[in-house]
Image: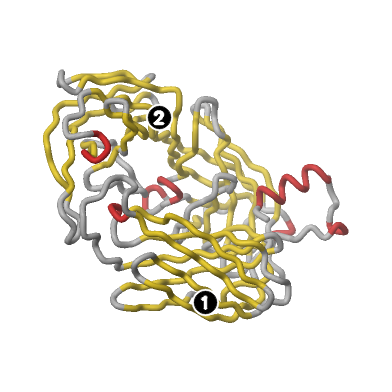
Amino acid sequence: MTANDDARVRAVLGRPVDNLKIPSLIFVDGVGFRAARVQLARSLTVERSGVTLCLHHLIAGFERTELSYDIRGLPAPAKPMAEDTETISLHTTLIADGYKESAHAQGWPRRFGSNFAQTVSLPALPPATRRVELVIEVEHLGAWRLATELVQAEGPGRVDITGTAERDGVTIQVTAIATDARTTAIELEVVRPKGVAHVRGIGGLFGFRRDASALILRDEHGRIYPERFRPVRALREDERDYAVFPPLASDAHDLELEVPTIFLEEGGRRAELDLERLPITCRLGPYSLTVVGRQLTSIQEGEAPARPMTELSVETGGWVGSRRLIAPWEGFADGNPTALSFIGGMRASAPEPVRRLLLDHALAGPNPRRLVLQHLLVEVRGLWRIPVKRPPSAALPD
């Protein structure tokens, strides 16, 4: 049960609901707000033949079991690849007394590099489970087996609160807080505006925040609580973001949360470009994008053979009020869906407008002539200053 699930149940049933035994949510560092019973005592790392597997979290809740791990140091593939022709196939099995559940995934396209992370959701473990065995099978590389004890899940309890701020038609709201002597966690979300397909990040892309993109919490006495860096995992579509700060002072009651920027995927924008008549400029709603030139190039990853690409040099039109175009999010080359890659990648904690786009010949063909762009990654700058009232139930005991 996530925080969103809990909120929906409470909205339907009304308050109080304590006698109905709806499980309380706690904050689990690195995971978020969960109705957790038991969890992994500490992260586990196993290395074999230069490949490292790290199990970061295993949270057993009342309705499901969640685990997250990453694998690093995968060997380079031996041949060129198209978008989906060679992926890492994963099979994750969790075993306990009277329990055996698995999840299969075509995990991470090998062209994206040698490291990847995976989050798996499985049915709930039996209530009395305190020891589990995890088997992670990776295609072509074999299986890892990890046995571990589970401990009672602990963390500060989630307390519902409400605080909102609006800027440039975008509202951000705070929905919950959890505090103890070690940490302060605040749950927040963007109220998705009309015409927005997805919210792609608060502060940074996909929740990656650091330095200037980090959130800041202040109290009424002028104290500043900077956001703590946290390992980022992929948030589910129904899941709110959260930020972690140092513990609050005992006399801190009236708080303010500062959000510097957000990233939205705007739908309803579409433009077609003739790549044989460059330079060419297109309008995508209020934004503009110019393809200045093109050239053939190739990408070399590890020891794999180079992959031929068409490289497009592009320019965006800068800020339009408080918004700017970072990159087109979807593309079709000569009618074929194609991935739009960015040379050098994109720094998720501080994205800048793309300057060079790559079209993989395996998808776009060796000489793409027409390119359709749709769905845009857009940055909206703040500040949003959200009032946060610390409820008495979130105060630390004397």
Residue at image point 40% right, 78% down: 46
Image coords of residue 312 (percent x, y): 19, 33
Residue 190 % position (x, y): 55, 39
Determine the residue positioned at 37% across, 53% down.
Answer: 211
Residue holding disc 1: 42
- Name the quadrant containing residue 285: top left
How many residues crowd around disc 2 within 10 Å: few (fewer than 14), some, or many (20 or more)?
Answer: many
* Three-letter code, disc 2: His
Q: Secondary structure at mark 2?
A: strand
Between the residue at mark 1 and the residue at mark 2, the CA separation in whole angstroms equals 41 Å
For the residue pair 305 and 295, the one nearer the viewer reads as: 305
Please say whether residue 47 is visible from this viewpoint. Answer: yes
Q: Nearer the viewer, residue 216 or 62?
A: 62
Asked which secondary structure carries label 1, the reply is loop
Q: Quadrant of the N terminus?
A: bottom right
Q: Residue 17, how many percent across, how many down? A: 84, 53
Please identify the quarter of the rendering in which residue 335 is found.
top left
Q: Are marks 1 and 2 in contact (CB under 8 Å)?
A: no
Sequence-first disc among 1 and 2:
1
Q: Is residue 398 visible?
A: no
> Which residue lies under the disc numbered 2?
375
| Vertical relation: 300 (above or below) 319 | below
**Which residue occupies 21% across, 37% down?**
356
* Image mark count: 2
**In the picture provided, is 392 more to the left or to the right than 203?**
right
Q: Is residue 15 above or below residue 334?
A: below
Q: Position of residue 129 (x, y in %)?
A: 68, 76
